[in-house]
Image: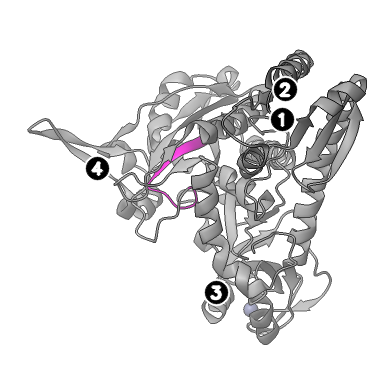
């Protein structure tokens, strides 16, 4: 069976991952995948709750750092989207166009936003007058549309990205924009840490940066099949967009200057990573920090004791809710406890309480952890303290488990043959690189892999004088490479 613990043969889990992922999305009622438009899916009620908790978390982090939420239209006029040449060159093949309104051709073709830089810049031009209007920091959570030509995967490669959180900022200097990118990185670190998702942070190579950016910083994680998933990006756009859209501000010395902008985003890929990285062969295993339900109570009784046990469970549920836990009481009388265990395990609820007549007599409850399936008995009057402690232990264990698996899938190699062998193990391979685009592209080509870029985090492993694995030139630079989604 599939498990992230790494106890299973690698070959098997590689092949089975997508199958497992689909099964969990379906059985845990996260995602409806039968909508008849390629790359479009439906968030089901339970999935929506999980998604909303994850969105709330990122919103909170943005609000705390002075970002303000806005909502821009989905349509972008063709003239706007064509203004920044690199941008349109990259997105041209992926844009969905609206060309008709009713029976009439539209005078201006409208793009369904593939991202919002070109919608936001003309409005920044109206909003920004003087240096006192800067910095300006906004964000929105919206759908974006990309006509993906590659195979689509639920939540991972979709045509309507329904959960695109994009932030856009404007600043007086390049340094301030660079500092803003640093702030974005620190926000995303907190965000992924709270979700117990491991990651590396890399500066994307010149040939793979965001179209129109000066540079792009990206967060990548490894899924259980060994393939790498990009889960967040931050771009320093310099003055590229402000020049194209003529967004200037009045400096204190009376001169006009173009503003410097940044943008950074995450999407439902984060939800996919939470599901894929923590899950096991029984289904979801959710971090208590974003689980829609933290504690589920399952009453255990023989015929005739229903009312006695269920009414006691109701009191326990009420008590826990009053103490700030999110609780579900499964009081369905037409389902067996075994059926309920399976049901809630599939949905990844961190803690399950089992309460029977003997527990009530002894003033205890039985608690089962979803992550380890460990069971223990807790005195009723210690419930609040003990459950809080346990939720924290579940979170810490998920984080530790995910990082240790991630560490096992982060390799180094000093020549092409070794890199090629390490690639087969799945995950990320760090290799010496002279810094030239030519060698970077040759490495991608030879290994049939993607360059993630140069490390900008403390996770880098190779140090000192190294030799480029393509040309042999001495260098202190390294590249991360991987098979990617
Ligand atoms: Zn080289």
Image quarter of the N terminus? bottom right
Q: CA distance from mark 4 to mark 1?
A: 62 Å
For label 4, count other residues whose C-alpha is less than 10 Å away and answer few (under 14), some (14-19) or many (20+). Answer: some
Q: Are marks 3 and 1 in contact (CB under 8 Å)?
A: no
Precedes in sequence: disc 4 or disc 1: 4
- Image coordinates of residue 31 in percent, x first then y, are 47, 42
Ligand 1 placement by image quarter: bottom right
Q: Are marks 2 and 1 in contact (CB under 8 Å)?
A: yes
Task: Report the disc number at residue 302.
Answer: 1
**Looking at the image, can residue 25 be seen?**
yes
Q: Secondary structure at mark 3?
A: helix
- Image coordinates of residue 32 in percent, x first then y, are 42, 42
Residue under label 2: 305
Precedes in sequence: disc 2 or disc 4: 4
Disc number lying in front (3 or 2): 2
Q: Residue at x 52, y 45 (%)?
A: 27
Task: Report the disc number at residue 444.
Answer: 3
Disc number lying in front (3 or 1): 1
Residue under label 4: 97
Q: CA distance from mark 2 to mark 4?
A: 63 Å
Given residues 306 and 451, the one toward you in this image is 306
How does the figure colour the protein chain or chains? Answer: one colour
249 versus 391 height, above or below: above
Q: Secondary structure at mark 4?
A: strand
379 versus 267 height, above or below: above
**The residue stretch that appears in magenta:** 155-166
As for residue 164 lying within the magenta part, the answer is yes
Disc number lying in front (4 or 1): 1
- Image coordinates of residue 377 in percent, x first then y, are 89, 34
Task: Report the disc number at residue 350.
Answer: none
Given residues 212 and 227, the one toward you in this image is 227
């Amino acid at each position: 069976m599939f498990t992230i613990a790494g106890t299973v043969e690698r070959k098997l889990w590689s092949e089975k991952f997508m199958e497992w992922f689909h099964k969990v999305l379906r059985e845990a009622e996260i995602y409806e995948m039968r909508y008849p438009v390629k790359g479009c899916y439906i968030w089901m009620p339970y999935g929506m709750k999980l998604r909303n908790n994850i969105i709330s978390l990122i919103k909170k982090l943005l609000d705390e750092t002075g970002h303000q939420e806005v909502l821009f239209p989905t349509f972008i006029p063709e003239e706007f989207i064509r203004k920044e040449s690199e941008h349109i060159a990259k997105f041209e093949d992926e844009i969905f166009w609206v060309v008709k309104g009713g029976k009439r051709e539209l005078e201006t073709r409208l793009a369904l936003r593939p991202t919002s830089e070109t919608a936001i810049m003309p409005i920044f031009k109206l909003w920004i007058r003087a240096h006192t209007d800067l910095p300006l920091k906004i964000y929105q959570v919206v759908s974006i549309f990309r006509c993906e030509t590659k195979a689509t995967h639920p939540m991972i490669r979709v045509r309507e990205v329904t959960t695109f959180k994009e932030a856009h900022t404007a600043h007086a200097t390049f340094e301030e924009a660079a500092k803003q990118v640093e702030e974005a990185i620190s926000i995303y670190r907190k965000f992924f840490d709270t979700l117990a998702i491991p990651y590396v942070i890399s500066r994307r190579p010149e040939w793979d940066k965001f179209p129109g950016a000066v540079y792009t910083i990206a967060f990548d994680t490894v899924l259980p099949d060994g393939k790498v998933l990009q889960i967040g990006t931050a771009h320093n756009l310099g003055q590229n967009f402000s020049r194209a859209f003529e967004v200037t501000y009045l400096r204190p010395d009376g001169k006009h200057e173009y503003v410097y902008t940044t943008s950074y985003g995450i999407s439902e890929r984060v939800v996919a990573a939470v599901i894929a990285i923590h899950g096991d062969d029984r289904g979801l295993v959710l971090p208590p920090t974003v689980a829609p339900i933290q504690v589920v109570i399952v009453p255990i009784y023989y015929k005739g004791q229903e009312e006695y046990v269920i009414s006691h469970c109701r009191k326990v549920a009420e008590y826990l809710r009053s103490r700030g836990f999110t609780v579900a009481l499964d009081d369905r009388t037409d389902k067996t406890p075994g059926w309920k265990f399976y049901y809630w395990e599939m949905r990844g609820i961190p803690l399950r309480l089992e309460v029977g007549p003997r527990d009530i007599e002894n003033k205890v409850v039985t608690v089962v952890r979803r992550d380890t399936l460990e069971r223990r008995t807790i005195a009723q009057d210690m419930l609040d303290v003990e459950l809080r402690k346990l939720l924290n232990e579940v979170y810490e264990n998920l984080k530790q488990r995910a990082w240790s698996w991630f560490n096992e899938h982060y390799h180094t190699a000093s020549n092409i043959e070794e890199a090629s062998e390490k690639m087969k193990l799945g995950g990320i391979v760090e290799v010496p690189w002279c810094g030239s685009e030519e060698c970077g592209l040759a490495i991608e080509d030879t290994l049939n892999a993607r360059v993630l870029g140069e490390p900008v985090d403390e996770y880098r492993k190779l140090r000192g004088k190294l030799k480029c694995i393509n040309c042999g030139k001495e260098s202190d630079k390294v590249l991360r490479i991987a098979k990617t989604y």
